[in-house]
Amino acid sequence: MTVANTKTSTGIQPNIAGLLCYLLMWITGIVFIIIEKENKFVRFHAMQSIIVFGALTVIDIIFSWTFVIPIIIGVLMFVLWIIMMINAFQGKMLKLPLAGKLADKYSNPPNKS
């Protein structure tokens, strides 16, 4: 089954929803992990967005008193943001080291009872 043929509870095409999970970084990740109840692809990208950009935001805040580290984090976030949106739009589940494994583990749709 391809990503284009899978169903989402939002009614948005999965590749578009996956891209939107990264649009406002961890913020849209949280929105999509809450509203998407069925689609593993979308939930994976939402969770990976939360983990990656949430962690980088925290690191950026912690080291905001320095000059160089926030610049490096900013560039890293921008590059990852572009790469992840392109991959999600293309229907790929690019798993980043550590974050991808965690996102895969915690992105399963909730059980229907």
Image (cartoon, rainbow, N blue to C red):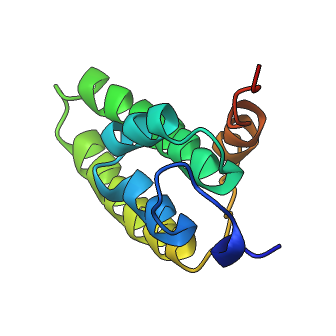
Question: Where residue 96 sits in the image (x, y, percent)?
Answer: 65, 54
| Quarter occupied by the N terminus | bottom right
Identify the residue at image location x=28%, y=50%: 24
Q: On the picture, is 29 further left or further right than 41?
A: left
Residue lying farthest to the right in this orientation: 1
Residue lying farthest to the bottom in this orientation: 90
Q: On the picture, is 29 further left or further right than 71?
A: right
Q: On the picture, is 11 further left or further right than 25?
A: right
Identify the residue at image location x=38%, y=59%: 20
Tally the marks.
0
* Nearer to me, 7 or 18: 7
Identify the image quadrant of residue 112.
top right
Question: Where residue 109 sits in the image (x, y, percent)?
Answer: 70, 36
Identify the residue at image location x=16%, y=25%: 65
Please tell me whether residue 71 is drawn above or below residue 51 in the rendered image: below
* Nearer to me, 90 or 102: 90
| Quarter occupied by the C terminus | top right
Q: On the picture, is 9 further left or further right than 69?
A: right
* Nearer to me, 79 or 30: 30
Question: Where residue 92 sits in the image (x, y, percent)?
Answer: 66, 72
Question: Where residue 98 sits in the image (x, y, percent)?
Answer: 70, 40
Identify the image quadrant of residue 66.
top left
